[in-house]
Image (cartoon, rainbow, N blue to C red):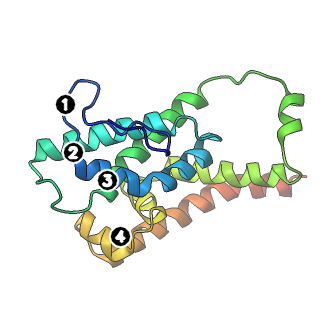
Amino acid sequence: MSVPSQGWWDRDTDQEGRRIRLDVRNAAHEIWQRVLAQVESVLGDSSAAGELMELAVAQASQYLDRRGIPVDSQSHVGLLLVVFWRLLERQRAVLSRLEPVGGISDLSARMPDDWSTQIDSRLDAEKIVGLLSEQSRTILALRSAGYEWSDISKLMNASVASLKGGFWHEIQRLRRKIESPKKLRKDSK
């Protein structure tokens, strides 16, 4: 077991003592910087990234072992990103139920000048991601990880056209749904 400079424990075994696959551990090193930024974006800080990565690596390794997938038979970056994204979303949901400590003055002192625009954009993005279907969230996670549509179509066993069309149709539908109440509020002022 070694502690890389990344900030998460790269273990040989999980908490129950099951062996963690080397190919999944290597995939974790490949995506660490991306997921660190993703955690920062979703949660506001990256302190939970290490724990989430450890869980994701253990879960992906167990999944591949249960399915009988040979070690190093393919890259598992996509699988690991999907597992990580699901864990991150669960963490976000838990934290959104908690009430923050501190007052409005504490918050305003930490906000940049264009904070309201940033907050609106982030809230819109969070709403859209939260309303996406499981398939579209998976596509979004893979696209944000740098995967091309052709790679995603192979992973999801569907045509590029159907995946791309369905994804963008869903995004547009949700965007209209979210923007309609905003427009009504602006028009009534």
* Residue at the image point whose x is 62% and y is 23% from the top: 98
Q: What's the mark number on residue 18?
A: 1
Which tag, 4 or 2, sits closer to the chain's start?
2
**Residue 184 image-quadrant placement:** bottom right
Secondary element at tag 3: helix
Which tag, 2 or 3, sits closer to the chain's start?
2
Front position among marks 4 and 2: 2
Q: Is disc 3 surrounded by few (<14), some (14 to 19) or many (20+) residues within 10 Å?
A: some
Q: What is the x, y in percent for residue 99?
A: 68, 22
Question: Amino acid type of disc 3?
Answer: Asn
> Do the residues under discs 4 and 1 have CB atoms within 8 angstroms?
no
> Do the residues under discs 2 and 1 have CB atoms within 8 angstroms?
no
Question: Amino acid type of disc 2?
Answer: Arg
Residue at which label 4 appears: 163
Q: CA distance from mark 3 to mark 1?
A: 17 Å
Q: What is the x, y in percent for residue 19?
A: 19, 35
Q: What is the x, y in percent for residue 164?
A: 40, 73
Q: CA distance from mark 3 to mark 4?
A: 28 Å
Q: CA distance from mark 2 to mark 1?
A: 10 Å
Residue at which label 2 appears: 21
The foreground one among 36 and 106 is 36
Secondary element at tag 2: loop
Question: Amino acid type of disc 1?
Answer: Arg
Residue at which label 3 appears: 26
* Residue at the image point whose x is 32% and y is 42% from the top: 57
Secondary element at tag 4: helix
Quarter of the figure with the N terminus:
top left
Give the answer, above or below, for where 111 lies relative to 149: above
* Residue at the image point whose x is 41% and y is 74% from the top: 165
